[in-house]
Image (spheres, coloured by chain):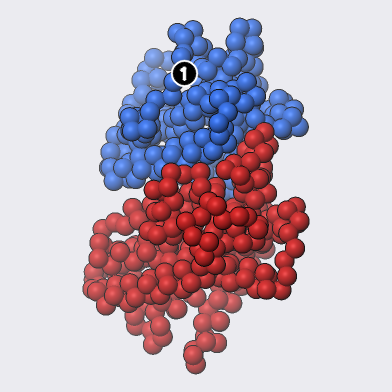
Chain colours: A red, B blue
């Protein structure tokens, strides 16, 4: 805990490095914003003629998208660079450097390679959430807002775990694990839509095996006040924070085992 | 002329062969395409529900749209804009301009080689696998429709490469500006009708899209295939394609002339 200010310095340095080039930062912000807004708008276009999919209206599906985008971006702040480059670091032996520092290697990695540019994604994600809440005329009380924050945190932990489970196997399979990373991103695209449109086998996978459905589908039932006829169990609606913590705990254990397994490739 | 086209065919084959080095990658792309197809089909099944046809479009036609669109989008994927940007900002463009081959056709042949490989070893097997496992779309296609589609999709592909190349040329002014790429991709996605077919679009967007070339890239060729555009309309669609190709080609010539005077090679 003593080194907490140190981690904060790593983050603030990387934020400053990004915002130093103000025009480039602004243009990236804008470009990403346009891409996300288009995706968001395309859901509206998709449902324009059909009005609803599996009983979900356009703004309800857009709410799912907004939850997905926001939690992904929150996780990507700390996880995108550290874990997408992990297999390269292990292969090249660059990973050695992390172990020579007298601080926690995982925290060090996450804070040093903090990607400030995800500020754009988070901003747009929250804006989209607000638009949906406004258009759906949802009234959220204090406890609802607190639960929303817990769901965002839990969702972010699930997303972070996905990054970690995708990358950490590189400690064992030095050659290539982009397979896992790709599968993760393919799986993520399932939860763009309410999972009730898929066959129940896929729903089970998205609930138990790769539990992405907890990022948006299940908690959305709570906020949208949907009846739970398309759920396996009504309690699943509240489980997001718990699932997040459990998955992330598992990812930490896996990380620890991986680091213990790590032999420098030398070079 | 013949010699030149053989040169580009050779480049295409080389870049096709280069892809064989990434065999694991194509397996991944195969899985990715399969998942994409699975999701899209589930979405359309969910949207159609019990209706056999909506807005006069049958469910089978939408399925055909999804599959053909996935195949076509593999063939028309392009990183030409980004590659041009890299060449301009690294200065490698200087060498390319000295070569006795056109930069445009070099870039396009390399891209086509890559895309052909992906089509043959990732997307097409994914589609076949999907259909073998989960059923073929039951839609009857006449020979005339298939021929119209062949003409339409050829024009569409030329049109897409023309657009990408023209966009790539803007990097002479902007340096390596990937955000232009992003911006355009979003814009095209909104008006091309590749994700949501234009049959189901709101009228306002259709009206704007009418004045843009993007719907002619893959949407209208597929509409020709399923027989949604027929007779004189079909001829009109193809004529519009070639009209746009001509306009964009003239624009490209003009931009290219401006660009050449703009080149200052950075570093060496």
The residue nearer to you, when weighing A155 against B10, is A155
The residue depicted at 29 percent of the width and 46 percent of the height is: B24
**Residue B226 as seen in the image, left or right of residue A148:** left
Which corner quadrant holds the N terminus of chain B?
top left
Q: Position of residue B155 (x, y in %)?
A: 53, 19
Q: Is residue B77 visible?
A: no
**Residue B228 as seen in the image, left or right of residue B42:** right
The residue nearer to you, when weighing A162 against A178, is A162
Quarter of the rendering containing residue B6: top left
Placement of B182 over or under A132, stated as above or below? above
Q: Position of residue B197 (x, y in %)?
A: 59, 30
Q: Is residue B46 visible?
A: yes
Placement of B139 over or under A62, stated as above or below? above
Q: Which residue is mark 1?
A: B139
**Residue A248 as seen in the image, left or right of residue A49:** left
SS state under label 1? loop
| Residue that sits furthest to the bottom in the current view | A2
The residue nearer to you, when weighing A95 against B14, is A95
The residue depicted at 46 percent of the width and 68 percent of the height is: A243
Q: Position of residue A132 (x, y in %)?
A: 70, 54
Q: Position of residue A204 (x, y in %)?
A: 41, 53
Placement of B249 over or under A243, stated as above or below? above
């Amino acid at each position: 805990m003593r080194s907490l200010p140190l981690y904060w310095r790593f983050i603030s340095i990387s934020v400053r490095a990004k915002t130093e080039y103000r025009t480039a930062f602004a243009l990236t912000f804008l470009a990403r914003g346009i891409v996300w807004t288009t995706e968001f708008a395309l859901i509206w276009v998709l449902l324009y003629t059909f009005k609803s999919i599996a009983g979900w209206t356009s703004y309800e599906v857009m709410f799912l998208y907004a939850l997905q985008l926001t939690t992904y971006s929150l996780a990507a702040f700390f996880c995108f660079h550290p874990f997408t480059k992990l297999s390269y670091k292990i292969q090249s032996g660059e990973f050695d450097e992390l172990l020579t520092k007298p601080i926690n290697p995982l925290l060090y990695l996450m804070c040093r390679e903090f990607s400030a540019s995800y500020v754009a994604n988070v901003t747009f994600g929250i804006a989209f959430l607000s638009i949906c809440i406004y258009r759906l005329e949802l009234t959220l009380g204090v406890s609802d807002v607190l639960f929303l924050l817990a769901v965002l945190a839990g969702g972010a932990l699930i997303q972070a775990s996905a990054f970690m489970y995708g990358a950490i196997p590189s400690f064992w399979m030095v050659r290539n694990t982009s397979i896992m990373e790709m599968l993760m991103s393919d799986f993520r695209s399932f939860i763009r839509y309410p999972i009730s449109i898929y066959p129940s086998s896929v729903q089970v996978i998205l609930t138990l095996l790769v539990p992405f459905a907890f990022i948006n589908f299940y908690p959305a039932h709570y906020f949208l006040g949907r009846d739970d006829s398309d759920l396996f169990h009504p309690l699943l609606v509240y489980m997001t924070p718990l699932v997040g913590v459990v998955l992330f705990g598992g990812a930490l254990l896996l990380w620890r085992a991986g680091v213990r397994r790590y032999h420098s490739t030398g070079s | 002329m013949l010699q030149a086209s053989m040169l580009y065919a050779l480049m295409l084959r080389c870049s096709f062969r280069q892809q064989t080095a990434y065999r694991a990658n194509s397996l991944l792309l195969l899985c990715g395409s399969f998942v994409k197809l699975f999701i899209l089909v589930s979405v359309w099944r969910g949207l159609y529900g019990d209706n056999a046809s909506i807005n006069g479009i049958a469910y089978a036609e939408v399925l055909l749209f999804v599959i053909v669109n996935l195949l076509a989008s593999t063939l028309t994927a392009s990183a030409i804009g980004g590659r041009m940007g890299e060449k301009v900002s690294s200065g490698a463009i200087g060498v390319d301009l000295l070569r006795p081959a056109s930069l445009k056709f070099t870039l396009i042949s390399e891209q086509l080689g890559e895309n052909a490989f992906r089509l043959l070893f990732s997307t097409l097997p994914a589609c076949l696998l999907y259909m073998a496992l989960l059923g073929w779309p039951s839609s009857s296609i006449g020979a005339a429709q298939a021929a119209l589609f062949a003409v339409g999709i050829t024009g569409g592909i030329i049109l897409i490469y023309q657009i990408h190349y023209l966009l790539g040329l803007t990097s002479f002014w902007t340096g390596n500006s990937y955000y232009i790429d992003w911006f355009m991709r979003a814009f095209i996605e909104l008006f091309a009708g590749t994700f949501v077919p234009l049959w189901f679009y709101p009228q306002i967007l259709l009206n704007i899209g009418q004045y843009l070339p993007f719907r002619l890239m893959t949407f209208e060729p597929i509409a020709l295939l399923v027989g949604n555009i027929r007779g004189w309309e079909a001829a009109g669609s193809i004529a519009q394609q070639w009209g746009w190709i001509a306009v964009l080609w003239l624009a490209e010539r003009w931009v290219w002339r401006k660009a050449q005077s703009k080149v200052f090679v950075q570093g060496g």
